[in-house]
Image (spheres, rainbow, N blue to C red):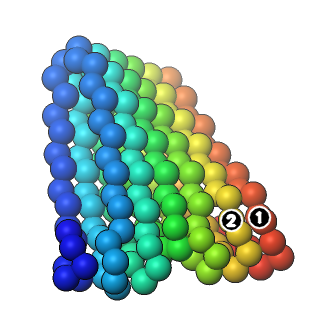
Amino acid sequence: ATARHRVSPSRTSVAVGCGVDFSLTETFEPVAGAGLTSSATSLHAGASARVEHVRVARAGCGRAHVGSTSIVAHADAQIRSGALQIGPGPLRHGVTADLIGDGATVELRGLSIPGAGGHHDTEATVRHTASAGTSRQTFAGVVPDRARVSFGGHVVVAGGTTGTDADQQSRNLLMGPTARAA
């Protein structure tokens, strides 16, 4: 995208075959001027696949970034997905993970560092629809004065499944009296 573009969309879809090891790093940089960057990433991991995913999004002054990551994990797949959000924003990231195969593991991590006066928002949902699934959600923020971060996390376990192991954490460091985290 260039400064002429007010809206910059990006769509990425990755299907990782059974038993394959795969790594993906995405970087979203702001362009000059006001506008919106919109990104959507889809990761589909076959049985016993191992996926490492890193997403770095920077939002410049007057430029918003709205992104989503959708994950599907089949039997015994292992997926680690991390997101780093930097800049004043506003910046929003929604991530969903569906564990549809027995023994699937998903680890979601995120760090938000808004600029002064900025706002970052993360929404995470993990759905366990198969048995013996493991999920970890670890999100954090370093929040300067006059900035805020928010996190909404959900774990949904389908009826009839057994052996689900899920953990969720949100920790924030407030750097001034008007810094906010929710």
Is 19 left, or right, of 162 in this rendering?
left
Residue displayed at 25% across by 79% down: 3
Amino acid type of the residue tagged 2 in the rendering:
Val
Q: Name above or below for residue 48 compared with residue 33.
A: above
Characterize the local packing of mark 1: few (<14), some (14-19) or many (20 or more) Cα atoms within 10 angstroms. Answer: some
x and y percentages locating residue 74 in the rendered image: 27, 27
Amino acid type of the residue tagged 1 in the rendering:
Leu
x and y percentages locating residue 140 in the rendered image: 63, 52
Is 59 left, or right, of 75 in this rendering?
right
- Give me the C-alpha separation between circle 1 and circle 2: 5 Å
Front in this rendered view, residue 170 or 163? 170
SS category of the residue bearing label 1: strand
x and y percentages locating residue 117 in the rendered image: 62, 80
- From this viewpoint, is residue 161 visible? no
Residue displayed at 68% across by 65% down: 143
Residue displayed at 78% across by 66% down: 175
Label 1–label 2 contact, CB within 8 A: yes
Quadrant of the frame with the C terminus: bottom right
Q: Which residue is mark 1?
A: 174
Q: Name above or below for residue 92 compared with residue 134.
A: below
- From this viewpoint, is residue 56 visible? yes
Residue displayed at 83% across by 76% down: 177
Q: Which mark is residue 143?
A: 2
